[in-house]
Image (spheres, rainbow, N blue to C red):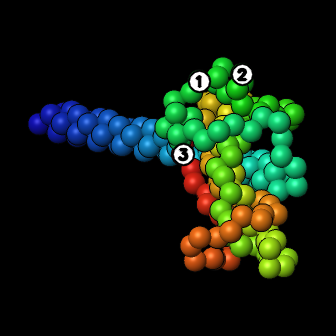
Amino acid sequence: MNDKNHGFILLIMLIFMQIFSLIVLAELMSIKLNLKLARDRWQKTNNLLMSNAFLHKIENNLIFTIPSCVQSALSPQFLINRSTEWWGKFACASNHTTLYHYVIEKLGNDPCALIRIIDKNHTITADYYRITLLFQSSAPKSFKIILQSTIVRPKTSTQACTEIPHQVKIGRQVYRELL
């Protein structure tokens, strides 16, 4: 009878050890998944910070000089659906080691958006441009980020305002992440 109890206790101990091993294995798999998700989130955040820095640089350059690659307005959905090859062919190219392309669209002038009044017949009004930036990381898991901002450039205007004039500031007016 004593031998039967030893065999039964051994069987119970083996079952408990098996259950304990499965719990430890499940926890290790959960930790591995959490580490992978945290790494991907960190990489995405890092890429977003880099792409924001590139967008800010492009915005600052656009305030002072208009590049030759300005296009007419395109829909955001059109830009989201374009391939990397399209961006490389039709967008402004980056002169940086990181892969990014951008499109500058002229949205037009608003004679009622006043930046400064020079005299009765001359004002500095808002000239609107939209920048769409495609950023692709060169990391093993490639992330594609598309950012868009609308900025105001100063423009001397003699055109009369037909609506209620409003004050605007030079620089970024709208920012959004498309992808």
Q: Sequence-wise, which precedes: disc 3 or disc 1?
A: 1
Check disc 1 and report the residue beneath it. Answer: 83
Residue found at x 63% / y 77%:
166
Task: Identify the amino acid type marked 2.
Answer: Lys
Tell me if label 3 and label 1 are in contact, CB under 8 Å: no
Q: Which residue is mark 2?
A: 89
- In the rendered image, which quarter is residue 132 located in? top right
Report helix, strand or loop for mark 2.
helix
Mark in front: 2 vs 3: 2
Question: Quadrant of the image for the C terminus?
Answer: top right
Mark 2–mark 3 Cα distance, whole angstroms, equals: 21 Å
Q: Nearer the viewer, residue 56 or 30?
A: 56
Q: Residues within 10 Å of mark 1 (few under 14, many from 20)?
A: few
Above or below, comparing residue 148 to residue 11 in the picture: below
Q: Quadrant of residue 160?
A: bottom right
Residue at the location (87% across, 34% down)?
Answer: 95
Q: Which residue is mark 3?
A: 178
The answer to which of 130 and 49 lies nearer the viewer is 130
> Relative to 160, is 54 above or below?
above
Residues at marks 3 and 1, CA–CA distance in whole angstroms: 15 Å
Task: Check contact, mark 2 vs mark 1: CB within 8 A.
Answer: no
Task: Tell me the kind of residue under disc 3.
Answer: Leu
x%, y% of residue 54?
A: 78, 47
Q: With 92 as the anchor, is 87 left or right in this view?
A: left
Query: What SS does tag 1 mark?
Result: loop
